[in-house]
């Protein structure tokens, strides 16, 4: 079951297989035999993964998840890249380090930008899922609360259990943290063997 996404010349095959299985479970809701209910769309999970790839600056993950989102045919690659970069620039701001008036302006600008992205994607939840995922990834209480409130309310309005959907989002965050770490260090580890 070895997956090309996680295979390199040093990483143990059984761990690569485990990562491949985790990828299937997180993104497809199946281990190949059993299927689980999913609460986020495949596109939402792939966009969150792509945003996290940009946040972590993992070129391998960016390439993989860009292709996955573009295969869905809902957005052009150039537009996707531009919007992801803009979103990540917003979300890199640590509001605990800025003044109250700057924080209020940041919140207003984010809401305006999120609305623009929502209308383009026909998905009100997408930018806030990305914001919440980045907040989870860096343990940022402000982003978790700010984006989490919007995600929770939108999910409730859609008749979905927010705990289940946010739990699914958390699994994407955990998977991407492991995958990005692995993919960023693999070429560096290979340097040991190139000498």
Image: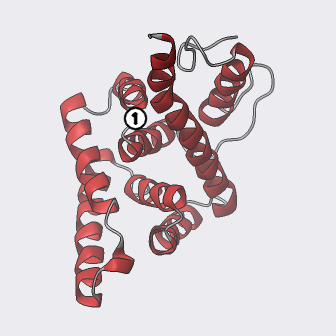
Q: Is residue 4 left or right of residue 36?
A: left
Residue that sits furthest to the front in the current view? 195
Q: Residue at x 70, y 24 (%)?
A: 21
Please give the residue where the numbered disc 1 appears in the rendered image.
Answer: 58
Residue 129, horizontal then vertical, whole percent: 47, 55
Q: Residue at x 52, y 73 (%)?
A: 141
**How many discs mark residues in the rendered view?**
1
The spot of residue 80 in percent (x, y) is 26, 37
114 or 138: nearer the eye? 138
Task: Residue at 34% x, 48% y: name it.
Answer: 122
Check the image and name the residue furthest to the bottom: 100
Q: x, y percentage for residue 9?
A: 56, 10
Residue 169 spot, x, y in % from top left: 58, 50
Image quadrant assignment for residue 195: top left
Side of 22 where 97 appears, left or right: left
Residue 105 image-quadrant placement: bottom left
Q: Nearer the viewer, residue 139 or 116?
A: 139
Horizontal side, residue 70 vs residue 161: left or right: left
Q: Secondary structure at mark 1?
A: loop
State the residue in front, 4 or 97.
97
Colouring scheme applied when the structure was drawn: secondary structure
Disc 1 residue crowd, few under 14, some 14–19, many 20+, Cα 10 Å: many
* The N terminus - image quarter: top right
Q: Decide: is 39 above or below 69.
A: below
Q: Residue furthest right?
A: 34
When the figure is inspected, residue 64 is found, relative to residue 177, above or below; the finding is above
Tell me which residue sits at (40%, 35%) in the image.
Answer: 58
């Amino acid at each position: 079951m070895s997956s090309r996404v996680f295979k390199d010349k040093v990483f143990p095959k059984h761990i690569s297989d485990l990562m491949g299985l985790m990828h299937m479970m997180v993104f497809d809701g199946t281990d190949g035999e059993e299927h689980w209910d999913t609460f986020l769309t495949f596109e939402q999970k792939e966009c969150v993964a792509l945003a996290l790839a940009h946040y972590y600056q993992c070129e391998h993950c960016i390439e993989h998840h860009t292709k996955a989102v573009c295969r869905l045919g809902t957005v052009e690659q150039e537009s996707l890249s531009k919007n992801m970069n803009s979103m990540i620039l917003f979300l890199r701001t640590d509001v605990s380090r800025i003044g109250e008036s700057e924080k209020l302006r940041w919140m207003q600008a984010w809401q305006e930008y999120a609305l623009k992205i929502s209308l383009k994607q026909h998905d009100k939840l997408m930018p806030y899922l990305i914001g919440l995922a980045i907040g989870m990834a860096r343990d940022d209480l402000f982003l978790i609360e700010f984006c989490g409130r919007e995600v929770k309310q939108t999910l409730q309005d859609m008749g979905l259990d927010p705990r289940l959907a946010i739990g699914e989002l958390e699994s994407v965050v955990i998977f991407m943290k492991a995958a990005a770490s692995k993919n960023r260090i693999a070429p560096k580890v290979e340097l040991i063997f190139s000498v």
